[in-house]
Image (tube, rainbow, N blue to C red):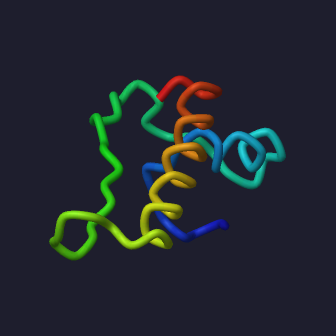
Amino acid sequence: MAGLGIAALPDFLTDVPIAEGTLRQVMADYPSPEAGIYVVRPPGGIAPRKVRALIDILIEWFGAIIATFGW
């Protein structure tokens, strides 16, 4: 990862590389801005079942991450 630059990434993506020493945290005192996650889909009343299933999976996945890491 050396030389790839600076990025704002969530803890669940960086905890292991930081612990392994392959990634270094910089600007630790700089507060991260609030961020949202959005699903954009075509307009219309009811989403197709596949789209609704994906939305439900994303809610479950990111809900678990938020509960675990406290976003």
Query: Relative to residue 19, is residue 13 depicted above or below?
Result: below
Which of the image's four quarters has the N terminus? Answer: bottom right
Along the line of sight, the residue nearer the viewer: 27 or 17? 17
Along the line of sight, the residue nearer the viewer: 46 or 31? 46
Along the line of sight, the residue nearer the viewer: 38 or 50? 50
The reply, left or right, for residue 35 in relation to residue 60 is left
Residue 3 placement (x, y as % from top left) = 57, 69
The reply, left or right, for residue 44 in relation to residue 29 is left
Query: Relative to residue 17, is residue 64 depicted above or below?
Result: above
Q: Residue at x 51, y 63 (%)?
A: 54
Residue 5 placement (x, y as % from top left) = 48, 64
Query: Relative to residue 57, is residue 49 depicted above or below?
Result: below
Residue 55 placement (x, y as % from top left) = 45, 57
Q: Residue at x 60, y 28 (%)?
A: 69
The reply, left or right, for residue 15 in relation to residue 37 is right
Q: How many marks?
A: 0
Query: Relative to residue 29, is residue 21 depicted above or below?
Result: below
Q: Residue at x 40, y 25 (%)?
A: 29
Q: Residue at x 19, y 64 (%)?
A: 45
Residue 33 placement (x, y as % from top left) = 28, 36
